[in-house]
Image (tube, helix red, strand yellow):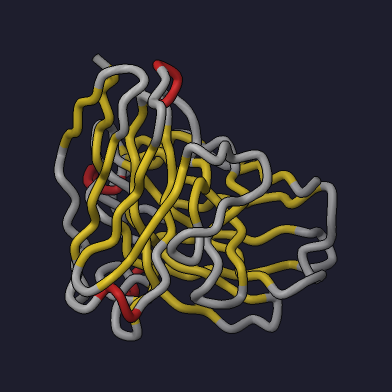
Amino acid sequence: QVQLQESGPGLVKPSQTLSLTCTVSGGSISSGSYYWSWIRQPAGKGLEWIGRIYTSGSTNYNPSLKSRVTISVDTSKNQFSLKLSSVTAADTAVYYCARGGDSSSYGMDVWGQGTTVTVSS
Amino acid sequence: SYVLTQPPSVSVAPGKTARITCGGNNIGSKSVHWYQQKPGQAPVLVIYYDSDRPSGIPERFSGSNSGNTATLTISRVEAGDEADYYCQVWDSSSDVVFGGGTKLTVL
């Protein structure tokens, strides 16, 4: 079955750009009708949706983060990526990638294990 | 932006029924999804499209959605059900929205 794995630096300096990649295994990122999403969770807090991408390249972002977020997809590598610019300590969180169904009728049924990113000098 | 409101905590004795609510303006017109998250783990989808269960989710988990409230119901609660639960919807203005989460404690 499809599995997701996040990767990237665990420590990012303030004002720099956070970059993470999610690798899809067990299936093609291009098959089926899905979107691919990033979600984050600060320690002890709830889930915050960051944004999503379809394999067509179409994206949607959380309005509160939109000015700093870019999500891209590389179908040849079966990966999608997150870039979050001008980070501060408030961006310290566990970052998850997830697969969602291409309709409001479906939730996010496959999640990565999460990767912790700390913003600190 | 669209807001989903969940109670911070719900407590229930083993074998009893737990109900976790998710409030939102006319949420009955939207599809609601529920996730279970145990400490140190990624969320798991337990209910989608208001009341459907993904394969592998016990029948003890059920959902409903009407008016301004969606409800996740867990019957015959077990110690292993202790977790945080999040509701989620799509919204035309905010796109994907999560509730604040509810900590389920099994007494």
Left or right position of B104 against A114: left
Residue B65, percent from left and from top = 33, 66
Q: Quadrant of residue B57?
A: top right
Regarding residue A36, the answer to whether it shows in the image is: yes
Residue B69, relative to residue B15: is it above or below? Answer: below
Residue B62, percent from left and from top = 44, 49
Residue B61, percent from left and from top = 46, 42
Work out whether residue B103 or residue A74 is closer to the camera in this orientation and state it: B103
Regarding residue A121, the answer to whether it shows in the image is: no
Left or right position of B65 against B8: right
Residue B33, relative to residue A9: is it above or below? Answer: below
Question: Can you say which quadrant of the picture contains the N terminus of chain B?
Answer: bottom left
Q: Residue at x 60, y 53 (%)?
A: A109
Q: Residue at x 48, y 29 (%)?
A: B41
Residue A63, relative to residue A58: is it above or below? Answer: above
Work out whether residue A24 or residue B46 is closer to the camera in this orientation and state it: B46
Residue A79, percent from left and from top = 72, 58
Work out whether residue A91 or residue A108 is closer to the camera in this orientation and state it: A108
Work out whether residue A29 or residue A106 is closer to the camera in this orientation and state it: A106
Q: Quadrant of residue A32?
A: bottom right
Left or right position of A40 against A33: left
Question: Can you say which quadrant of the picture contains the C terminus of chain B?
Answer: top left
Q: Residue at x 50, y 46 (%)?
A: B46
